[in-house]
């Protein structure tokens, strides 16, 4: 195996024996094969689109699901992954037939040629190792694009479950997969496609924002309980708001409390979800602490998206975990939606009724709900505090949390920021500082949490609004510093979206991605000032100048 898609890549280079995430080499091999089939389907469909034949819902759903399933810590279930491969091969065969019937010529790429007949799945998957691209700079650019597509697919999947689709995004996905499949793609073509990936990343975040707010209302400033009640509970983690809505509906009057975990925390901010009194609080912290926290929760757990940490063999919770959507883990029951998109959580509810209430691990409240609509309502107060000097600078500290000791940087950085600065956050990176008592500036909390990682889109809108108010030529003239923590592919698409929008001098940490070659890093540094963090002391000095 060789995998370097997440921030924890072994030795900062890549995992070659077993993934730091817990994936074994077999699982990695099957995921490589799934991506190969994804590229094949996307490449053929791209040629069909050029000839006026749009993709079907089946094709779109396969591309989104496969890309999402291959994201870091999303799917560890070999059988489920192979099933996706088989579905992709069936779709590819159908597309080849359509191309033949319409006399459409196709490029002679390996992703198109292989039909699952010449070799077995495992050997073909091994051939798909990304190192087959010998030129490290071309390989780097291709990886940036494919990882950006994975993050974009995650956002698109959530939006589509709420009935919001965008054919331009799907057409672009096929175009990008076709270019990645082309062994003769040039650096110039790949760089251009990277920027286009950022463009459509913005479109995907905009689509999801519209889907979430149209369905559940605009997020509101909300104090969220982090203690526990005395009734049995169900813990739901991940990003999918449709899932928690259905769970809340099915558990109404069942004597069960619902707790969010990790990236599901922002569910508390939406009016249409806040109305359920048995949505009682948030339990725990970011994804990487789930082994200890799940053991203390006592009730069943539902994974709606990625960020699975494989349990220890003797974990007391491993027999009461469920997955859904693109996630999977061997031995955990997977809940599928019916033809109407409805999921049956009755088995989860039945188990919950036999469990003890959660064991408290903390108490108190945290505040969030500062998405763009809410911040716009505070715009007058924010602008006034900027003008009179009470707010000197904003620090966008969105992104991912992780388990590496070096991530203590973000907690220390937040603690040492001057009291006339505001932290704008989204994603699970907030768990490094959202429980610190950093105070307020004239009633404005110094940590403004917009929500999930896709809600980084809110900070783009806020920045553009401030640019408009102050009559500036560029968002880069604003007193805003971007200090982004990353772990996986949803952070990659956020970064590409910011680069496409022309945001400069972004700092990424705790390390730069291993999939970026030195030459690609140099290009991004020269074009955008992209750099990595150093020490808290040095960075504060640099950012506050």
Image (spheres, rainbow, N blue to C red):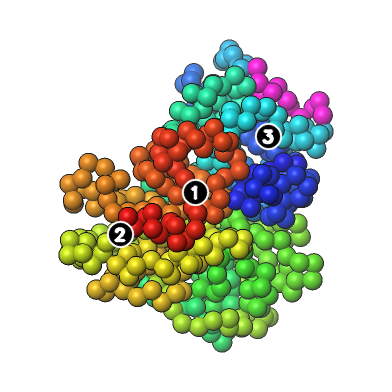
Q: Residue at x 52, y 57 (%)?
A: 400
User: What are the residue bounds of the magenta stretch?
Assistant: 108-119
Q: Earlier in the sequence, mark 3 or mark 1?
A: 3
Q: Residue at x 80, y 37 (%)?
A: 122
Identify residue for label 1: 532
| Left/right of residue 542 with respect to residue 86 in the rendered view | left
Q: CA distance from mark 3 to mark 2?
A: 42 Å
Disc 3 to disc 1: CB gap under 8 Å: no
Q: Secondary structure at mark 2?
A: strand
Q: Secondary structure at mark 1?
A: strand
Identify residue for label 3: 130
Q: Earlier in the sequence, mark 3 or mark 2?
A: 3
What mark, if any, has residue 393 been given in the picture? 2
Residue 112: in sight, yes or no?
yes
Classify mark 3: residues with Cα within 10 Å, few (<14), some (14-19) or many (20+): some
Q: Is residue 114 magenta?
A: yes
Foreground: 384 or 250?
384
> Residue 297: x and y, percent?
63, 77
């Amino acid at each position: 195996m060789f995998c370097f898609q997440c921030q924890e890549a072994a030795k900062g280079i890549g995992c070659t024996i077993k993934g730091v995430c817990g994936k074994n080499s077999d699982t990695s091999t099957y995921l490589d094969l799934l991506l190969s089939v994804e590229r094949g389907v996307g490449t053929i469909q791209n040629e069909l689109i050029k000839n006026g034949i749009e993709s079907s819902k089946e094709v779109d759903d396969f591309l989104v699901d496969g890309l999402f399933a291959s994201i870091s810590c999303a799917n560890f279930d070999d059988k489920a992954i192979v099933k996706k491969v088989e579905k992709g091969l069936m779709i590819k065969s159908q597309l080849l037939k359509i191309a033949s019937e319409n006399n459409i010529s196709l490029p002679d790429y390996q992703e198109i040629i292989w039909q699952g007949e010449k070799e077995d799945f495992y050997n073909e998957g091994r051939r798909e190792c990304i190192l087959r691209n010998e030129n490290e700079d071309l390989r780097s650019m291709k990886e940036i694009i494919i990882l950006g597509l994975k993050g974009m697919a995650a956002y698109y999947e959530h939006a589509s479950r709420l009935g919001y689709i965008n054919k331009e995004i799907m057409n672009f996905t096929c175009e990008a997969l076709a270019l990645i499949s082309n062994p003769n793609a040039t650096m110039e073509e790949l760089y251009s496609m990277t920027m286009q990936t950022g463009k459509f990343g913005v479109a995907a975040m905009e689509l999801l924002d519209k889907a979430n707010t149209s369905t559940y209302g605009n997020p509101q400033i909300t104090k969220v309980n982090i203690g526990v009640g005395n009734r049995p509970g169900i813990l739901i983690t991940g990003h999918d708001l449709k899932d928690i809505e259905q769970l809340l509906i099915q558990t109404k009057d069942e004597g069960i409390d619902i707790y969010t975990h990790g990236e599901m925390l922002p569910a508390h901010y939406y009016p249409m979800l806040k109305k359920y009194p048995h949505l009682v609080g948030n339990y725990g912290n970011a994804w990487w602490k789930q082994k200890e926290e799940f053991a203390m929760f006592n009730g069943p757990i539902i994974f709606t998206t990625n960020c699975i940490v494989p349990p220890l063999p003797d974990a007391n919770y491993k027999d009461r975990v469920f997955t859904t959507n693109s996630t999977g883990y061997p031995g955990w029951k997977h809940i599928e939606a019916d033809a109407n998109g409805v999921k049956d959580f009755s088995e989860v509810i039945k188990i919950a009724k036999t469990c003890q209430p959660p064991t408290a691990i903390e108490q108190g409240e945290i505040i969030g709900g500062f998405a763009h609509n809410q911040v716009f309502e505070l715009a007058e107060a924010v602008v006034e505090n900027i003008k009179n000097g009470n707010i000197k600078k904003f620090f966008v500290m969105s992104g991912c949390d992780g388990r590496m000791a070096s991530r203590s940087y973000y907690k220390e950085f937040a603690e040492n920021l001057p009291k006339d600065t505001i932290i704008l956050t989204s994603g699970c990176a907030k768990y490094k500082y959202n429980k610190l008592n950093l105070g307020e500036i004239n009633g404005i909390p110094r940590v403004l949490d917009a929500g999930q990682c896709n809600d980084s889109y809110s900070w783009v809108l806020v920045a553009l609004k401030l640019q408009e108010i102050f009559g500036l030529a560029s968002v880069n003239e604003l007193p805003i510093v971007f200090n982004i923590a990353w772990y996986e592919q949803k952070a990659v698409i956020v970064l590409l979206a910011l680069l496409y929008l022309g945001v400069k001098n972004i700092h990424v940490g705790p390390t730069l991605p291993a999939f970026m070659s030195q030459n690609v890093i140099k290009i991004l540094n020269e074009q955008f000032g992209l750099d990595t963090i150093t020490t808290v002391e040095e960075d504060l000095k640099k950012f506050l100048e």
